[in-house]
Image (spheres, rainbow, N blue to C red):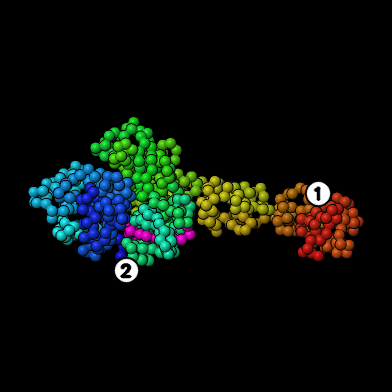
Amino acid sequence: MDSRPISLTIGTAGHVDHGKTTLVRYMTGTDTDRLEEEHRRGISIVPGYAELTLPSGRRASLVDVPGHERFVKNMVAGSTGVDAFLLVVAADDGVMPQTREHLDVLRVLGVRRGVVALTKIDAVDEETAELAELDAAELLESVGLEAPILRVSGVTGEGVPELLAALDGLAVGEEKRAGALARLPVDRAFVLKGIGLVATGTLWSGEIRTGDTLFTSAGLRPRVRGVQNHGRPAEVARAGARTALDLVGVDADALEPGDVLLSNPVAPTRALDARVGLLEGAAPLKHGTRLRLYHGTRATNARLRLFDGAALQPGENAPARMVLEDELVVLPGDRFVLRSTSPQITIGGGTVLDAAPVGRRPEPGWLEALESGDATRVVPLALARSRGSGMTAEELSLVVPSGALNGGLAAVEDDPEIARLGELYAPAGEIKDARKRLMKALKKRAGERPESPELSVAEARTATGLDARLADALLSELTGQEIRVSETGVRLPDADEVPAELEKEAEEVLTALRAAGVEPPAMEATPALRLLLKRGSAVRLGEGLFGAREAADEILEEVKEACREGGELTLAAFRDRLGTTRKFAQAWLEYADAEDVTRRVGDARVLTRRYR
C-alpha cells in the first residue's frame, strides 16, 4: 500500500475517439471505460480514474473525462478539482469542436497548466502530424495558454516516456488542497452486496479516515467504515485521491451523485456572489439571463444578476450574483462553469467570492476585499458582518477565500482592531464596548442591590449585547481579573464586601424579627432584609411577611409534631396550638407547604412522604 499523498490531479480532455482512454491505459494499465455501454459504444460516458506513478516516484491521479458533446456535463464534473490538463488531440483529426470546449471548461475552472498529447502518431505521416501540431499550437495561442506539444502513441508507446517526464514536471512544487475541511463531491453512490453503501469521488481537500463521521447538506451523518484509494484499501484518503468510502448509518438511497460529504457541516446556499467571466467567442450576457451552472458533481439552473451594467461582453468579467434554483455547497474560491440553455454550449464561468451573500447587493468594499486575498482586509470585514457573534478560525475559512488565510491567521493576530477570546475572533471595538456595558451593569447592580450584587449569567450575557457564545467567551476572558463568576452569577471583585451601614441595618432588622417570633411585623423587602434572606438568617412567609430563621425552624418542628399526633393538621388547630391569629397561622402553614414539609388535603395538612 503506497501511503504517499497524491501530488497532482490531471484531467485528460479532448474530442471523442481521439485516444484518451487508450493513452491512459498504456500509461497506467487501467481501463477507465468501466461501463458496459462505454465498451459497446467505444466512447467514455462518465469520468474514469486511474493512478499514475511518475518517473520521480510522485503519484498522480488521472481523470479521463468524456469527450462526446452529449457528455460535457460529466466532463465538467470530472474536471472540477483538477490541477493540470492533458489535452489529447488526434494527429489524424486535429483540433475539433469538443477539443475547444473542453479546453474552455478547463480554463474556466482555473486549470492553465498542462501538456498536449498529439496521439495516434503511429497512424499518420510526418506532414499530417505537423499540420495537427500546428493546429494544436494555434488553439493554445488563441486562448493565451502555453503548453508543450508531444507526439505519442497509446498503441506503440512512442513518446510516452517524454510525456510522463513532462507531467512529472507539472507536479514540482504542487501542493494539494490539504485544508482542515474534508470535502468529497460524490459522483457515484451505489450498494455492493456484503459491503453496503459506497460513495465515490475525488477528495478536494482535507483527509478522511476510517471511523470518521461525515456530514451532508441534508443533515445526514454517515460514518466511514472503510476507505479505498484508486481501488486499494487505505487508512486515510488525502486531497487529490480517487476515493471510495464504505458508509454506514444512512439508508442505501440516502446519497446520490451531486451530494457532498464533509468533515464538518457547511450550510448550503441558493445564492452566491462571484467574479463571472465570459469566453471570447460567447454572445453578450444580459442581466437576468437564465443559465446552467456546474459546480463539482452537481448542476443547477441559475439566474445572473449583474451589479453594474446591463450586459457582460465577450472576454470580459464582472462581479455578479448567481441566484440558484437548487441548493449547492460552495466555498469562497470555488470555480464553476456556465453553459447557455439554448444552444447548450459552454460560455464562461466564475469564481465564488461570497457563498452566503447578505442583502440585495454586497456591502461596499466587501467583494473587493475578498478578491484581494489580503487577510488584513478580509478578516475585519468578515468579523464585522458576524454582528456580535464572533467567528472561529474554522468559520472564517468558510467565508474567507483560502488564499487569504494561508499560514493561518498569523497576519491578523497582532492587529489591534481584532480581539481574540479563546477560539473566537471579533472586532476589538465591539469587545471593548461590550466590556463597558457589562461593567456598567455590574456597578449599577452593586449600587442598587448591595445585598445581592451579582447578575445571573443570562443577565450578564444580555448586558454585553453580544451573542451568547461570544458573551461567554468575554466572561471567561474577564474572570479572575475584572469579574468573579460563581454558581450564583457574575459580580465585581469588591462586590462581596457589604457596606458597614448595610450590615448595621441588617442586624437591627434581624433583632426585630427574632423578637417578634411567631408574629413577625409586616415590612418591605429592603436591601437589609434581602441580605438576611440571601444569608438564610430570615425566611419569606408571604407578601410583606418575613420571619427569623430560628422561629421558622421551631414552627416547622411544631407542624411535624402536630401532624404525627393527629394524622393531619387544620388551620384552626394550628392557630390554637401557636396561640396566634388566623393570619399568622395561615402564613406559617403556607411556608410549611413551600418547604415541602406538608401538603394540603382538603381543609387540612398532612406530612409529605419525606417526613412521615
* Label annotation for residue 546: none
Q: Residue at x 62, y 58 (%)?
A: 487
Segment tinted magenta in the rendering = 238-250
Q: Residue at x 33, y 32 (%)?
A: 286
Q: Which residue is mark 2?
A: 1
| Horizontal side of residue 130 vs 345, given as left or right | left
Q: Say which quarter of the image contains residue 307.
A: top left
Callout 2 secondary element: loop
Tell which of 332 and 582 is nearer to you. Answer: 332
Report whether residue 21 is seen.
Answer: yes
Mark toward the start of the polypeptide (2 vs 1): 2
Q: Residue 4 at x, y = what percent?
A: 30, 65
Q: Please identify the residue farthest to the top as the structure is shown.
A: 310
Give amino acid for label 1: Ala
Tell me if mark 1 has few (under 14), some (14-19) or many (20+) residues whose alpha carbon lies within 10 angstroms of its own.
few
* Label annotation for residue 522: 1
Q: Say which quarter of the image contains residue 515.
A: bottom right
Give amino acid for label 2: Met
Q: Cα distance, mark 2 to mark 1?
A: 85 Å
